[in-house]
Image (tube, helix red, strand yellow):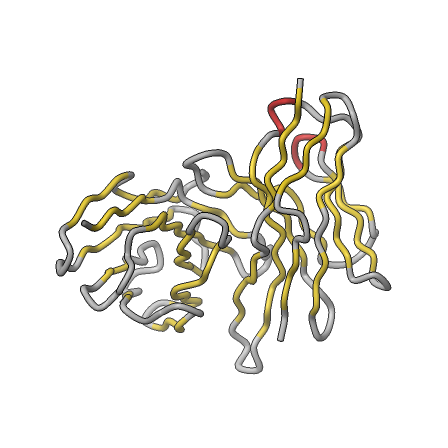
Amino acid sequence: AQSVAQPEDQVNVAEGNPLTVKCTYSVSGNPYLFWYVQYPNRGLQFLLKYITGDNLVKGSYGFEAEFNKSQTSFHLKKPSALVSDSALYFCAVRDIKASGTYKYIFGTGTRLKVLA
Amino acid sequence: DGGITQSPKYLFRKEGQNVTLSCEQNLNHDAMYWYRQDPGQGLRLIYYSQIVNDFQKGDIAEGYSVSREKKESFPLTVTSAQKNPTAFYLCASSLTSTYEQYFGPGTRLTVT
């Protein structure tokens, strides 16, 4: 079965330092991977996706993610964290059924706290 | 929150009452989804639909029902059979060709 794991419930980083939020996945076939961000009491916002191509994917707000097939990982990164990056981050994978229907499986989320 | 609207933002109901949550999108997206979010549990899929008049159960469909009579609308009914309905409900949509989901602002349902 397809699955996604976010091993850290919370990540703390100082403002200006690089940040990494980890995600590992288990899928059969080629993975379609996504990162979303959620601010308090709001819906999720799409950050970036990996479908095919370059392993380094660039997204919104200066975020990027590195797809690593051998380690089955898709970690979210940013070179210099801002206090406004503090939020809940979700990794997701697309799960395609034999019938052709598809759905998305989300990790449990990682709370990022950027300290001033 | 893109072109997806959910109403109302907050909803209060007494136990034993059915309640319907609205989700409308003007993005011309094919697929629509309902998720439930509880603290520390991430998002759990309730129902999803990829075409009009067709939908599939997600991981936690018991006690919920949906309809997809129009492409832009995917209302969710929380029935009295749902044992623990208090939660934050999120609706999303996606286009088959681009894959990423767009989420509405959510409805926080409290049942007492």
Name which quarter of the figure residue B66 lies in: bottom left
Measuring from the top left, give residue A3's x and y in whole percent: 63, 66
**Total label count?**
0
Residue at the (50%, 34%) spot, across then down: A39
Q: Tell which of B2 and A56 is nearer to you.
A: A56
Residue at the (63%, 41%) spot, across then down: A10
Name the quarter where the N terminus of chain B is drawn: top left
Measuring from the top left, give residue A75's x and y in whole percent: 75, 48
Q: Tell which of B40 and B28 is nearer to you.
A: B40
Residue at the (66%, 35%) spot, across then down: A60
Q: Tell which of A42 and A113 is nearer to you.
A: A113
Q: Is residue A29 left or right of B4 when viewed as pictured?
A: right
Q: Residue furthest bottom?
A: A98
> Vertically, is B52 above or below A45?
below
Measuring from the top left, give residue A56's x and y in whole percent: 82, 46
Measuring from the top left, give residue B88's x and y in whole percent: 36, 47
> Vertically, is A20 above or below B94?
above
Residue at the (83%, 62%) spot, across then down: A69
Name which quarter of the figure residue B19 lies in: bottom left
